[in-house]
Image: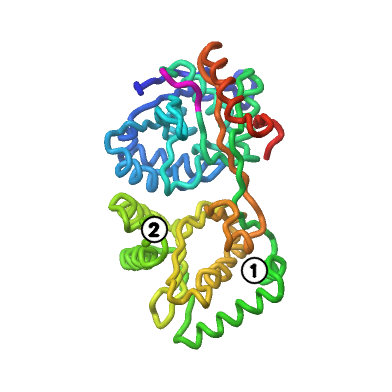
Amino acid sequence: MNDASFTIRPMKQGSPGATVALASFAVQPWRAWDSDQARAVWDALAARAGTPNPFFEHWYLLPGLARFDPGARVQIAALTRGDAAEALVPVQRAHRYGRHPLPHLAVWLHANAFLGAPLVAAGAEEAFWEALLDWADRNAGMALFFHLAALPLGTALADALLALCARQGRQAALVHREERALLTSKLAPADYLEQALPGKKRKELRRQHARLAEQGALAFTRRQDADGIGPWIERFLSLEARGWKGSAGSALACAAETAGLFREAMTAAAQRGCLERLSLELDGQPIAMLASLITPPGAFSYKTAFDERYARFSPGVLLQLENLALLERPDLCWADSCAAPDHPMIDSLWRERRPLGRVSIAIGGAARRAVFSRLVSIELSRTPPRTLQGLS
């Protein structure tokens, strides 16, 4: 993918005739954003993002890129205005689409990044999509379409994409839609729990808590500072690796890349005050742990682990009951579980849902768009054709 940049027309604001600085759009190797100056610009953008996404903030994205893309094939597409960034997203040229050899452009994600929403300053959504798709039209190369995974639907970000594609007559197809557990309510934790779970289940959880407390000194700990973060990280990695994920080879500690990402990103998050560490400890040793990323007005339940020797007491569920305290935080309106759809535990406790979609978008000229339309028709042949129109 070659570097590309262009200038966008100035946008009016305020009194008639008034303009803001010219906006420019550039696609550069991701290492161009790996500097103190670039991180400061990046931080300012994250603070203004209409749809928070910690997985595309520099303290999480750069460590992932360093480990999963050492050859720097991934690039950063950014819309800037003066010295400020209006939008930023990692993009790649992918050569396969699922099992099929279909070249396309895509937002880059790895297995431990759970949201594909570009970082876009509130109000700049449509300008960003227009610049990104204009660039994709000009620089399609062999790519047949542009693809976005884990795009949160029903947001200003998705709505702006819909509006732009409709205005341009550009096909945008929702090729997959799923929902995952979301926590958002004005109820107090106790009242929320009462409505979420039947009385019999709440009684059973109280019994398990009492029986677990008979095993030793039981306590919850919650922190959002950086003190002791190193030992906490190592305890988490060890706890997760001793469970089923370790046996399956999917625990963070099973690969140097994922272990290194967790250590670096969680240390940075703790130092920035955006990591909440919640633990259930028995005699001072954690038997359930949860790492949540705090990005007001939202939060993300990033990683959790529990000691399977105590599975009969449901320590992971007991930890999630304590985690309902998120409802009392004045800076948070919602929490994303980051869990798989239909998760057997969290779906029964968190009653709200966050819709996510995989969206493919036409790019290039008429011939390329005709090929894309055919590909979409084939992909959706088993279900009624769907576009972004009317979906949330």
Dot 2 crowding, Cα within 10 Å, few <14, some 14–19, many 20+: few
- Residue at the image position 44 percent from the left and 86 percent from the top: 216
Mark 2 or 1, nearer chain start: 1
Please name the residue that numbered disc 1 is placed on.
189
Three-letter amino acid code at the position of disc 2: Ala
Please name the residue that numbered disc 2 is placed on.
248
Tell me, what colour scheme is on the image? rainbow
What x and y, as percent, mark residue 213?
50, 85
Q: Is residue 367 left or right of residue 179?
A: left
In the rendered view, tell whether residue 299 sits above or below residue 279.
above
How far apart marks 2 and 1 lie (CA) works out to: 34 Å
Three-letter amino acid code at the position of disc 1: Pro
What x and y, as percent, mark residue 122?
57, 37
Locate the N terminus by quadrant.
Answer: top left
Magenta-tinted stretch: 142-146
Q: Is residue 198 visible?
A: yes
- Residue at the image position 33 percent from the left and 38 percent from the top: 37
Q: Nearer the viewer, residue 274 or 44?
A: 274
Dot 1 crowding, Cα within 10 Å, few <14, some 14–19, many 20+: some
